[in-house]
Every structure is written in structure tokens, then in C-alpha cells.
Amino acid sequence: MFEIILGITTGIILPLQTAISVKLRKTLGTPLRAALATFFVAAIFLGLVLVMSDHTLLISSTIISKQPWWIWIGGFLGVIYVTGNIILFPRLGSVQTVIMPVFGQIIMSMFIDNFGWYGLAQHSFDWIRAISSLLILSGISLTVLVDRRLEKKQNRKISEKIPWQLCGVLLGMCNTTQTGINGHLGSVIGSPIQATFISFVLGILTLLMLTLIKDGSLGIKNGLKSGQPWWVWTSGLFGSMFILGNTFLSPKIGTGLTVSVVLFGQIAGSLLIEKFGWLEAQKKSYI
């Protein structure tokens, strides 16, 4: 029961983090800068947690030399997912930014669980998991139809969203792959927190290089002078808690069930954000 409650809470965190990241993008000017700031704050937070709990920030050379190469790409996949969500949010809205990646998450989680990819325990795709997946996909489809009906009422072109919706599906596949990889890394080094910290540090290195190449500067100075509310800088805290929750749950209850319970929280959180306009998001009424 504890894992289920934790999974739902973890899911609620994601749309909150995405909404804050969109505001951070406006503060810093580009998605890459916003993602870099998010990863940096997350790494600092997790580093402090590790130090306060007497954990080391480093990993042994034996683990580095003996583990497969793919165990280190979780941070890169996290970069794709966070940056992609920042880009999708203003184009799809809070609800679809959450639920479109779920198609990819469900598909990828089925493969990971059924074949035991990324060193995780194998969970055969039985009829119970099949029914659960169909129910989730049915709920997602219903939500998309409701959202499309709302778009028609507002005279918006639905066809313009299709490419972005497909991008959302690919982002979901990246996210579930990251969850599996980080879950295995956490098992190998014996610490989900340290695995999450490593993922963010590798993500920072990737984003730092991309930001300097594409944007030329980090934009921190102008961002601090922008007069934006203090909470725009908390995106990394929410992001670290989301990844940490997934990393903790994946080896314990399986990738598929982790995705399912986290999804419930994601949809609930995104509906609340759009219903009440939290974090300065655009309000939508579904009634």
C-alpha cells in the first residue's frame, strides 16, 4: 500500500514540475537553459541529501568498468524528457503534456517487464497486465477526446497538435527507459538516491555542452534580474523527487505497475493545474 501511495504522490509531482519549468523557460529565455537550471538545482538537492545521510557522492571504479555502457545514459534520456516537456507544455496544455507520453510509457513498460530488460526482474505480460493496460489506454483516449472537444469549442486547429502529440509518445518511451535504467543503477550501487544523483550530474554535463553550443550563454544573470517569483527555481526539487520516486519503485513493484500508479497521480495533478490555473498555467474548464 505504501508503494501505491508513493507512486500516486510521485505522479502528482510531475505536472507541477513541468508547469514550473515552463515559467523558468520564460525567465531564462530557452528550453535548454531552463532544463540546465532544473538539473543543477536537483543535483545540489540530492547531493546534500547524500552527504547528510553519510553516503558518498562517488562510485567505485569497479562498478564503472564492469557495468554495461547503457547504465549511464539515464541522465541523457532525462535531458530529452525534461526539455521536451518544456517545449510541449505551451503547445499541448498540462493534460496532454502528461497523457500523450503515457502511450509511450505503457508500450515501453510492457517490453521492459516482459523481457526483463535493463537488469530488472521479469514480469510476464499476463491477462491481468493486459486488462490494466487497456483500461489505462481507454482512460487516456477519453481524456484526449474531451480535450479535443474543448479545442473545437475554442476554434483551435486540432491537426496542428498531431506532430507534438507523437513527440509526446516518444518522450514517454524515453522516460520509461530512464526509469528502468536508473532502477538497475540503484540496485547495482545499493542506493536509489545516489543513482538519481548520478543521473542528474550526467544530465548537467550534457545540457551544459548543448546550452553553450546553441545558446552561447547560460542566461543566469538576466534570469536573476527578471523579477519572477522565487518558486520558478524550484523545478529541480520537484524533478529530483519525481525521478527518485520512480527509481525507488521500479525494482520493487515492476516498471509496468510503477508507470500505472504514477500515471494516476500525473493525470490528477494535471487536471487540477488546468482547472484552477495553478502556477500561472492557463485555466481550462472540462464541464
Image: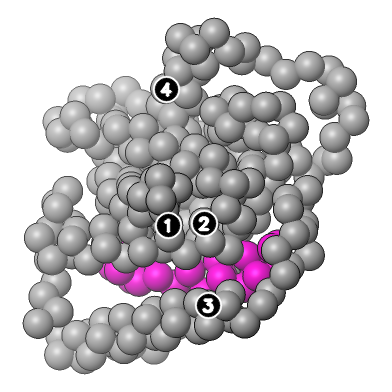
**What whole-number distance in Å separates the C-alpha atoms at marks 3 and 2?**
12 Å
Identify the mark nearer the N-term, 4 or 2.
Answer: 4
Q: Looking at the picture, how far across and down is residue 110, in whole percent?
A: 65, 70
The answer to whether residue 98 is left or right of residue 197 is left
Q: Secondary structure at mark 3?
A: helix
- Disc nearest the viewer among 4 and 2: 2
Amino acid type assigned to the residue bearing label 4 in the image? Phe
Three-letter code for the amino acid on which mark 1 is drawn: Val
- Main SS of the magenta part reads helix
**Spatial separation of the CA atoms under disc 3 and disc 1:** 13 Å
- Tag 2's secondary structure? helix
- Around disc 1, counting alpha carbons within 10 Å, would you say few (fewer than 14), some (14 to 19), or many (20 or more)? many
Q: CA distance from mark 1 to mark 4?
A: 22 Å
- Residue identified by numbered label 1: 262
Up/down of 47 relative to 30, above or below? above
Left of 110 or right of it: where is 132? left
**Contact, CB < 8 Å: mark 1 with mark 2?**
yes
Q: Residue at x 11, y 75 (%)?
A: 285
* Residue type, mark 2 in image: Thr
Pick the quarter of the image with the C terminus. bottom left
Q: Which residue is mark 2?
A: 258
- Give neighbour class at mark 2: few <14, some 14-19, many 20+ (Cα, 10 Å): many
Q: Which mark is residue 45?
A: 4
User: Residue sitting at 50 percent across and 77 percent down?
Assistant: 132
Crowd band around label 3 with a 10 angstrom C-alpha radius: few (<14), some (14–19), many (20+): some
Q: Nearer the viewer, residue 164 or 56?
A: 56
What whole-number distance in Å separates the C-alpha atoms at marks 1 and 2? 6 Å
